Image: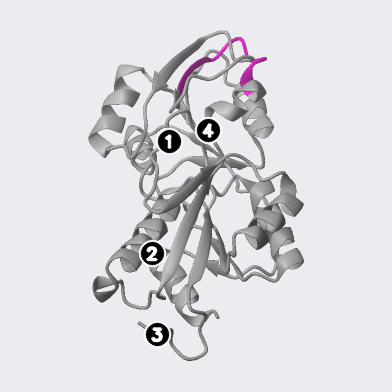
Amino acid sequence: MPAEPGRPASRHVLILGGTTEARGLAEALAGAAAAPAREPAGAPRPVRVTTSLAGRVAAPVLPPGGTRVGGFGGAAGLAAWTAAHGVTHLVDATHPFAERMSFHAAAAHALTGVPLLALRRPGWSPGPDDDWTFTGSLGGAADLLASRGRARVFLTTGRMGLHHFAHLTDPWFLVRSVDPPAAPAPPRLEVLLDRGPFTLAGERELLDRHRVDVLVTKDSGGSATAPKLVAAREAGLPVLVVRRPAAPQGVPEADSVAAALRWLARTP
């Protein structure tokens, strides 16, 4: 089928992934490429999709289409890879707390001129029955926990930042992560290896079984891990929420896969 007037014969979308939204976009684009007659409304065609994963999970669930694992070597390396592989559109669908990669993507966009979109799910907002305290960093969350003595803490901020809590000897920590965390870590620690999405019934049972006093989480947003917040509200538990880091300014944003597809459809 000939390309539409004004559009290149093919597109290569590079997705900086690792999130549910990144996988959803890869599925939509790969599906459109494989079966154009059934492509999602607004999706451009023809299209090639490559998802880049950071490689922090030992056995990631690979999305459809092409994949690459590992870093690029900073913004210059990402720009070089983009140029060498004919990338026409760059989508930053990394975790909201992967701020370094987001700034590398913005710098690579400036170097190459390849259109860039940030696909970022909305953050969470507390309701009237929630007992949330916001803090600006994992270190700030650790400082707040220090005043809670021998509290039983459900820590869901990921294994990479566990060192921020390693000096806390009084609290007991339940840490949930996909892969086992490495030292340094708090001395009173139990690790639960699990991968979302999680159910509300499961989170209720977990909080009750482990007699959790306080929940600590990042403002990751999305529905896959939100049930813990509902369970904490129902149990009357306080929640320490780490705010999202600053994101690059001037980058177009989409809050859903559908919005990202619309951006791709209208962006040459």
Give the residue pinned by disc 4.
157
- Crowding at dot 2, Cα within 10 Å, few <14 / some 14-19 / many 20+, comes out as many
92 displayed left or right of 156: right
Q: CA distance from mark 3 to mark 2?
A: 19 Å
Residue occupying the point 36% across, 44% down: 224
Q: Under tag 2, what secondary structure?
A: helix
Camera-side residue: 171 or 203? 203
Q: CA distance from mark 4 to mark 1?
A: 18 Å
Q: CA distance from mark 1 to mark 2?
A: 20 Å
Residue 219 seen from this side: no
Give the residue pinned by disc 1.
60
Q: Under tag 4, what secondary structure?
A: loop
Give the residue pinned by disc 3.
2
Name the spot of residue 170 as percent of width and height, x first: 58, 10
Name the spot of residue 237 as percent of width and height, x first: 42, 32
Mark nearest the camera among 3 and 2 is 3
Give the residue pinned by disc 2.
29
